[in-house]
Image (cartoon, grey):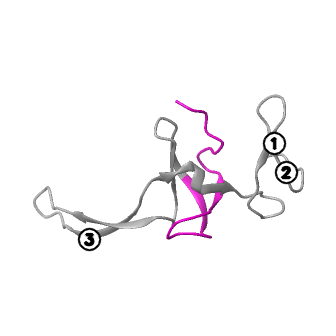
Amino acid sequence: MSKMFVKTGDKVQVLSGKSKGVQGEVIAVSPKENKVIVKGAQVVTKHIKPHRMGEQGGIVEVESAMYASKVQLVCPKCGEATRTNHKKGGIRVCKKCGHEF
């Protein structure tokens, strides 16, 4: 299991794939698989079967997991995708403007 550089609730930008350039919030993080789910990115269609009486089935669009290496943190101050430095205590710092988040 590896340590993740993104946390749930962080704003990230997708670097590659069919959702390249999309900015969204991290919904879920899976350190075991090294994957993240980003709101509004990597949207796939899923066929849902009705399970109960009266429940409706159909085709639903949901976000799919993607590798964490395909996303980069967006600095809340300068608004750009950036790498991060780390200070003592686990504080992340923007490499471009020096803002702590």
- What is the C-alpha distance between the residues marked 1 and 2? 6 Å
Magenta range is: 1-26
Q: Residue at position x 47%, y 35% from top?
A: 32
Identify the residue at the far right of this view: 98
| Label 1 sits on residue | 85
Q: Which mark is residue 101?
A: none
Q: Earlier in the sequence, mark 1 or mark 3?
A: 3
Q: Is residue 43 left or right of residue 51?
A: right
- What is the C-alpha distance between the residues marked 2 and 3? 42 Å
Badge 1 amino acid: Asn
Mark 3 crowdedness (10 Å alpha carbons): few <14, some 14-19, many ≥20: few
Badge 3 amino acid: Ile
Q: Which mark is residue 95?
A: 2
Q: Secondary structure at mark 1?
A: strand
Q: Secondary structure at mark 2?
A: loop
Nearer to me, 28 or 55: 28
Q: Which mark is residue 59?
A: 3
Q: Name the dominant secondary structure of the magenta segment.
A: loop
Q: Residue at position x 77%, y 64% from top?
A: 80
Q: Is residue 8 above or below residue 13?
A: above
